Image (cartoon, rainbow, N blue to C red):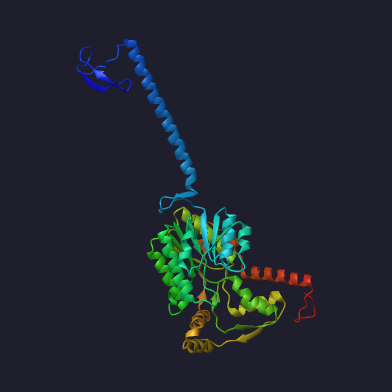
Amino acid sequence: SGRGRCSCSGSTQVIGHSSSPRPGVACARPSTSTKQVVVGKNARKFRYHHLRHVAKAEASEASREAGDAKATETTAGLGGTPVKRTSLLVVGATGTLGRQVVRRALDDGYEVRCLVRARENPADFLRDWGAIVVNGDLLKPETLPPALVGVHTVIDCATGRPEESVKKVDWEGKVALIQTCQAMKIQKYIFFSIFNCDKHTNVPLMNIKLSTEKFLEESGLDYTVIRLCGFMQAVISQYAVPILEEKSVYGTDDQTKVAYMDSTDVARLTLAALKQDDAGELKKRVLTFAGPQAFTIQQVIGLCERYAGADAKVTKVPMWWLSATRVLTSFFQWTVDVTDRMAFAEVLSSNESFVAPMEETYAELGVDPNQTTTLEMYLQDYYSKVLKRLKEVGAESRQGDYYL
């Protein structure tokens, strides 16, 4: 005899030879009746099927829960940490576009984190909306990783301020951000570029946007590039307000047309693109967003005059003056950034149309084009609110014989 494992109890028993139906394999415990052996087998069979049923039910429940969670949760590559699909980081959240993206994302149920620079006047309005505000700076790469922990998607709305270097913010800062996203295994990256940037590589800002697009393409990140033609909000500061304040506005005689779009509509389309991206339909591609209609500078000024009820004081700027001034300022190091921005202004006065067809984009994103704000609607709404407010405070217009 020797030692072996009893098939009915799993315990180690002495194995004998004399009473076994099969030579050399018999349990040394007292013999049992055939009935008892059958019962034991049936019990084991029952336990087996019961456990199998329980395991199958638990697996089915786990699968169902995983399916429910799939829409909102994915696994990041960094340490296998679960990251919700609805977790966003908006860079440039206090800007014209960034704040609208934040607001739209919150309305759509996303968990929004905003990267803002530390400043004396904090972005409390973002917190009031329900967003989480974290301090960071594209010019300080060491501040970026903490802001990206637990983030699934980065929406990059940032751009340099007028007093800042375009190269440092829009190129060096964006490269640092994209590299950090690579290291942190960010799942999606949305970048805003400029329409026709690939046709004007001689303009520094547009060349930087195109270079960033290429760098993002080579990064290995899942990305969407959105090229924009122009914001309606820029019309307010450049034309609507000066005309209302009876100040001069600058224009040219060229026929350049821009299809301005309200930043709220850009945000709405961006979130629609993000949802399509989650469905795997818009991975690694370039989209163009343009307004319903393109306008020349003269047409924009005419609309402002109509809704403001005032005549504009227009100062015409010849094209040769823009070109000559750009060459002159390029000789001085401290005016290089001014030169870059004037080069961009020169492109916007080159008789080129910054407009793109949107029918396929609306259909692809599942968005109703009739909900997009036109420039006429935007300016009419703006002036009606401003004039109403001026009337409430008793302000007097020097442009006519009525009180506003």
Instruction: Give the residue displayed 62% in from the left and 70% down from the top.
Output: 375
Q: Position of residue 104 (x, y in %)?
A: 58, 59
- Exactly how many numbered labels are in the figure? 0
Q: Position of residue 30 (x, y in %)?
A: 30, 12
Task: Pick whichever, 319 or 278, lies toward us.
Answer: 278
Q: Quadrant of the N terminus?
A: top left
Q: Is residue 48 above or below residue 97?
A: above
Which quadrant of the rendered structure holds the C terminus? bottom right
Estimate the x, y position of residue 29 in percent, counting from the top left: 29, 14
228 shown above or below 34: below
Residue 50 picture quarter: top left
Quarter of the image for residue 232 reads bottom right
Q: Is residue 344 left or right of residue 218?
A: right
Q: Nearer the viewer, residue 324 or 33?
A: 33
Residue 162 lies, in percent from the top left, at 55, 77
Specify whether residue 25 is in view: yes
Residue 363 visible in rendering: no
In the drawing, does residue 228 fall left or right of residue 179? right
The single residue placed furthest to the top in the displayed view is 33
User: Which residue shows up at 68% across the image and 68% down it?
Assistant: 381
Q: Is residue 23 above or below residue 335?
A: above
